[in-house]
Image (cartoon, rainbow, N blue to C red):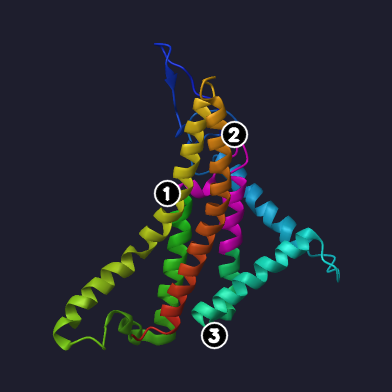
Amino acid sequence: MATEAAHGGEEGGLVFHPMDQFIVKPLFGGEGVHWYTITNATLWMALTVLAIVALMVLGTSGRNRIPSRMQSVAEMAYGFIYKMVEDVAGKDAIRFFPYIFTLFMFIVTANLLGLVPTAFTVTSHFAATILLALSVFLTVTVLGFVLHGKQFLGLFWVSSAPLAVRPLLALIEVISYFVRPVSHSIRLAGNMMAGHAVIKVFAGFAAIAAVSPISIVAIAGMYGLELLVAFIQAYVFTILTCVYLKDALHPAH
């Protein structure tokens, strides 16, 4: 995450640009960004993938009886998500564990790498989080119809409710279902963007000698909070994916 200090404006005051850190820029010059342009977002997505490979492949290649730190982290992450999938979505959802585990590892790693000074936070961009959310939405929707056919529509029909209100509840269920990818993506991107912007503002105040000690303490506190948020947001995204998967596997109310 970029932490450039705020600079003086034309009138000598401090000018903050906390949102500049989220601008997608070409890595090799030029101004236009096209689908083939290698950008800072491209770089940090690649670094995220490399970090995951290093942790899960290189870190566990030895399979020592006394695990190294990397192996311990990898095994803890594996066990944590496996138990989540089993508890939330059921034993029949274990076959989708590799997909859900990949989602969790990508999001949590991207969140943590985004806390590195001057880094680019991939998960602060709606383009990335919407793609992740849409992949989940389309996967569970297609899976629901493939497994259950028209019976999957039973997800929207609350049979336990009085008959007179079932159509209204069905409409509400349909709307809430199609809103899922929106809320799923905005929650992650919004939380990551907000925390990083606040840290940038505190970093700007650090240029003022009178309040710099307070600003530094605030930055340290926010970094600690953002570390927690990085894990919580990855956890929330993953557990909601498990909930949606459960709906696809067991659609009846």
In this picture, which residue range is highlighted in magenta?
103-125
Mark toward the viewer: 2 or 3: 3
Is residue 38 at least partly visible in the picture? no
Which mark, by number, is residue 243?
none
In primary-sequence order, the first of circles 1 and 2 is 2
Which residue position holds label 2? 27
Mark 3 packing: few (<14 Cα in 10 Å), some, or many (20+)?
few
C-alpha gap between disc 1 and disc 3? 33 Å
Q: Nearer the viewer, residue 75 or 127?
A: 75
The part of the image, by quadrant, that contains residue 152 is bottom left
Rendered location of residue 32, percent (x, y): 47, 32
Nearer the viewer's eye, disc 1 or disc 2? 1
Element at badge 2?
loop
Residue under label 3: 92
Label 2 amino acid?
A: Leu
Helix, strand or loop at mark 3: helix
Disc 1 target residue: 190
